Image: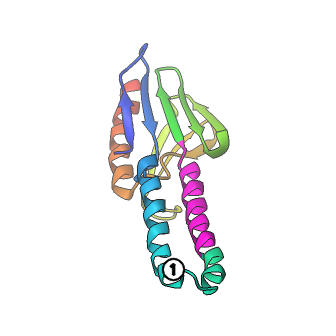
Amino acid sequence: MPYEWLPPEGGEDRLQLWPHRSLDQRGFVWFIGMTAALIALPLLATLGNPVLWVLLPFLIGAVWSIWFALRKNGRDRDILEDLHLSRDRIQLVRHGPKGRRQDWEANPYWLRVTLHPTGGPVPHYLTLKGEGREVELGAFLSEEERLSLEGELQTRVNALR
């Protein structure tokens, strides 16, 4: 699961959430290399022919486009959500792409963990509501992971009260 309960530290529970990362750096290099080789394979028949120079820019453009799209997707997945649970405060810190940081705090006594089966951007939309503000938790998780997380989170929040 792309979330983990860290060991309690100073009476505070900590939850970290992150998106799935199925393609590591080594896999990225292999994918780009194999794609370039497979796209270039038909060009071998045009070696020594002026047609090669007409097709070559399209080959380079296609490989560059794939490289750019995968790199952008990788940067967009650089999200980390940290949830700190203590008796007097609950704090959610979201580290987004490009170093963007968002903070949210609430009193655990008034906190509401809500799983919206419908009506959200995704099925079983998980939110935390407290101090007049509602925030989404784990937007990148799958439906089953949000269902599982909601039960675990509700149990830990109830233990704080």
Q: Which colour scheme is used?
A: rainbow
Q: Is residue 100 visible?
A: no
Residue span colored magenta: 59-79
Query: Is 36 placed above or below 5 here?
Result: below
**SS category of the residue bearing label 1:** helix
Q: Nearer the viewer, residue 84 or 115?
A: 84
- Assess whether residue 93 is covered by the magenta stretch: no
The residue at 33%/45% (across/down) is 1
Residue 16 point in image, percent of width and height: 44, 35
**Vertical side of 56 occupied by 68: above or below:** above
Image quadrant assignment for residue 89: top right
- Work out which quarter of the rendered image holds the C terminus and state it: top left
Q: Which of 144 and 97 is in front in this view?
A: 97
> Which residue is at 41% across, 15% downward?
11
Among the 4 quarters of the image, the one containing residue 95: top right
User: Which residue in the protein does label 1 denote?
Assistant: 43
Residue 122 picture location, percent across and down: 48, 62
Q: Which residue is drawn at 58% across and 49% down?
A: 75
* Amino acid carrying mark 1 in the image: Leu
Give the percent coordinates (x, y) of residue 63.
56, 67
Q: Which residue lies furthest to the front in this view?
A: 48
- Relative to 106, residue 71 above or below: below
Does residue 54 appear to the left or right of 143 in the view shown? right
Point 59% across, 85% down: residue:
49
Q: In which quarter of the image is residue 157?
A: top left
> Is residue 96 something one can see in this rendering?
yes
Residue 70 lies in the magenta-colored region: yes
Query: Quick one: 126 or 46, which is closer to the camera?
Result: 46
